[in-house]
Amino acid sequence: MQTIFISTSYPGRARPDYFLALAESFAADGFQVIVIIDGKPKKLPSHNKITFFSWPNKRPTGITDFKFLRKLIKEYHPSILISSFGSVNIMNVCGFFMKVKSRINYILSVSEPFYEKPNFYKRLKRQFLKIRKIFIYQLATLMVYNSKGTETDSISYYKLKSKDYLLLHNLIASSKVKYVPKTERNNELIIVGNLIKRKGHSFLLDQFKETLNDFPNLKLSIIGNGVENESLQKQVEVLKISSNVNFIGQVPNNEIADYFSRALISVSASSQEAFGFINIEAMREGTPIISTRTAGGLEIIEKGKNGCFFYLKVKNSLTDCVKSILNNWELYSAQANNTFINSYSLEKQIDIHRDLLKTKFI
């Protein structure tokens, strides 16, 4: 029996739920599975086929985390380590020195934060972090990317051309919300995400004002909080569209499906996006997408079927997409739901992900 270690966060959000489902899939396939949770939870999950531990530190980056992992490796003798985000460094370095055969890293975001223009000291720090990450990733035996855009970006930025890799899209669980037909939906667009510049809210508001010339009763609901909140609200006042824009604020993850299911169209206006859980969460509810041409959007959206691409700085680009979708909304909605079921359903795809991973270490 092979043993596999998976490092993730506490279940309850899309990414850790994916890794827990992956752990369950490996356990059902006869693997001994150890899941290591970050964040120092007060109580660990329980499962009759999975053993859970928590890292000593909230973020597993210290020497105590290294020693902890080394002890677990000596005890359970894993042949596979799977990690992402904060635990990658410890898992790769310790796994390398402890001679664990397969060290698998999930890369789930683009290097966009490094493209910002920080001051000298921040640039120096980010250059150091980049060099360190290049070294860390060279210790991996397999890279897993969630989109072609993430793959291209990471191979270029972190010099990973020689590394073996897999392309495995993000997955989410099927909806618990009943499908809502067009006649029962609100006459609104919805955008969900942190209120930060790269999410493109300001450009969207400018375009939305133009869209109101053709659809004067259309609403825009903005879900999320962030540093741009005040400036965006002022922009809405300047544009004189306050009666058409609703700032909802932060919404619990378990309530997002309700909002998507009652909107006509979901909008993603980001300048950079690795994949975009938001897009597949919307499609899960049969809600078509209007998106910029980001890494994730290019793979999720099929123009003329489940959504439409628009350009932040091209006048009437949003309006044209809204017209196209609303003129044939039922078809777009059905195709959006089919896209989710056939490509991004956690229940339908997780065993396929497991088997694709197995081809790389068995």
Image: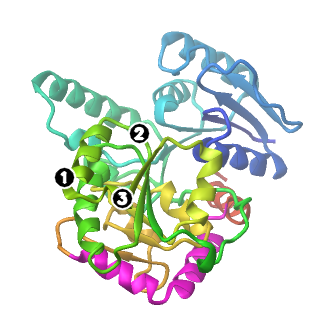
Say above or below: 343 vs 202.
below
Q: Earlier in the sequence, mark 2 or mark 3?
A: 2
Horizontally, is 171 left or right of 266 in the view? Answer: right
* Residues at marks 2 and 3, CA–CA distance in whole angstroms: 20 Å
Which residue is identified by label 2?
A: 225
Marks 2, 3: nearer the viewer: 3
Say above or below: 334 vs 174.
below
Under mark 2, the amino acid is Asn
Q: Earlier in the sequence, mark 3 or mark 1?
A: 1
* Secondary-structure class at tag 3: helix
The residue segment tinted magenta is 316-345
* Secondary-structure class at tag 1: helix
76 is within the stretch colored magenta:
no
The residue that appears at 47% across and 40% down in the rendered structure is 140
Under mark 1, the amino acid is Val
Horizontally, is 91 left or right of 199 in the view? Answer: right
Which residue is identified by label 3?
A: 243
Q: Earlier in the sequence, mark 1 or mark 2?
A: 2
x and y percentages locating residue 309 in the rendered image? 33, 74
x and y percentages locating residue 121 in the rendered image? 14, 21
- Whether residues under marks 3 and 1 lie with C-beta atoms below 8 angstroms apart, the answer is no
Q: Residue furthest left?
A: 120
Which residue is identified by label 1?
A: 238
